[in-house]
Amino acid sequence: MELPDLKSAVWKNVVTGKIPLNSNFLAAKMLISRVQTDVKNDPSPKNIDKAIGELYELFNKYKDLPTLSDDIQKLNSAGN
Amino acid sequence: MKKVMYTLDEAKKIINEGKRLLIAGDEDLLKQLPSGNWVGGSIPYFMGDTGGTTSQKSILINELPSYIKNSKINTYNISNISKVYADGYDNGFSIIIIPSSSDTHLYFATHAPEFTGFATKPLIGWISGLLLSELGKSTAKAFQGTESKMLEKEAVVMHLELPGEKYAEINIINIFNQAIGDSIEFPETGFSAKEAIINGTKQKFDRYVSSKNLDVKLPLVADYNGASVNISFQSVDESNSTVHFYAPVFKGVTYKQAAPVKDYINDFIKLIPKEGTENIIFSCNCILNYLYSALEGKKTGNITGPITFGEIAYQLLNQTLVYLEIKNK
């Protein structure tokens, strides 16, 4: 399944907590929470970009797993 | 349900068959095991074949599937534990065992979410322990089976590679949920706290716990995007105005105390997956659940594994059952 482009605003909205993503995939829940906490503690553009990069890497690695399909659909809907 | 509890002689025989094994048992038994392709940790409490069990005569063995392609066993201390995710296979999983109260335990607990590759590869495991009456007299251990090495300060990790058509997925079973109550944040990350920010106002946390008469058997719970992550209370030290926890609270994370649980076993069994439990190849549950819910003699569905001093599902958790399933892509 295709992910939203790395430059899509949807990734920033996830790491800043503007889009809630109650994933079924524990790894995603853990990483999203970690990067949201990082961004809350340091909301600088550099830190937000780092958080987006980490999250994108996780989703890109596991994008074909059935467990992530709902999340990816939600990301694509939110990105449109 | 597959048998998991064995005598010492049976365990020796299984190791000598050359299989990849995850082992839990009393330190005195594990010290007698031959070298082989296994990792282990000390603990005398189990979710065994017949339910919750305390035994210093039985050994719990999880035999890993024969389709695993490759494996490697590494040891880690505070100087290299940050590589534990990076060292894992791209398609696989890793099992970690860390001795309770070791520097490696404390460092991993506080820093794992910062490690390179955090959550990008499945990491599951447990904090080893000992008979509760031995606390303060002895120490927890991890075991590196290939060299029959007993570790008091280091973690042992078995990294495993799966064939391309399979993947590993970690899940947790946590019967606790956030109550409708105060929002609690902490100004610093750590295993203890003197102050907390309660609904936006900084307060002495020990005084808050006392004045609210909190039941410290109920953990603090954070909502990790739908996953409830517990932090269990260890003690309230009023003489030093400090509250101690069994896992670190994290700066920037919002906690609420858990709602009371009326019937642990039934609530728990309702959450256990009804199908596919044959694909669960490892699980463990918390000693606090074992104690507070009187699990001795009670069965937790088809789930077996060590009862631990801390559970690891990517990072350290408390009062939670964690498990790993192998699925087809």
Image (cartoon, helix red, strand yellow):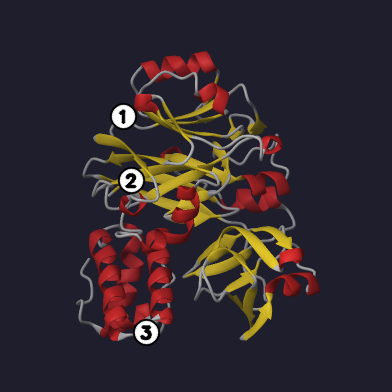
Residue at 80% x, 69% y is B213
Asked if B37 appears above or below B320 in the picture, the reply is above
Q: Which of the 4 image quadrants contains residue A29? A: bottom left
Question: Which residue matches tag 2?
Answer: B93
Q: Tell me the SS state at disc 2.
A: strand
In this rendering, the answer to whether B137 lies above or below A2 is above
Q: Are marks 2 and 3 on the same chain?
A: no
**Residue A33 in view of the camera:** yes
- Which subunit holds the residue at mark 1? B
Residue closest to the eye, B304 or B2: B304
Question: Is B135 left, or right, of B304 in this rendering?
Answer: right
* CA–CA distance in space, label 1 to label 2: 15 Å
From the viewer's perspective, is the residue at label 2 or at label 3 nearer? 3
Of circles 1 and 2, which is in front? 2
Residue projecting furthest to the front: B240
Q: Nearer the viewer, mark 3 or mark 1?
A: 3
The quadrant holding residue B258 is bottom right
The kind of secondary structure element at disc 1 is loop
The label on residue A43 is 3
Q: Going by the image, does B24 lie left or right of B235?
A: left
Residue in the image at 71% along x and 69% along y: B241
Residue bearing the label numbered 1: B66
Q: Is residue A80 visible?
A: no
Q: What type is the residue that disc 3 sits on?
A: Pro
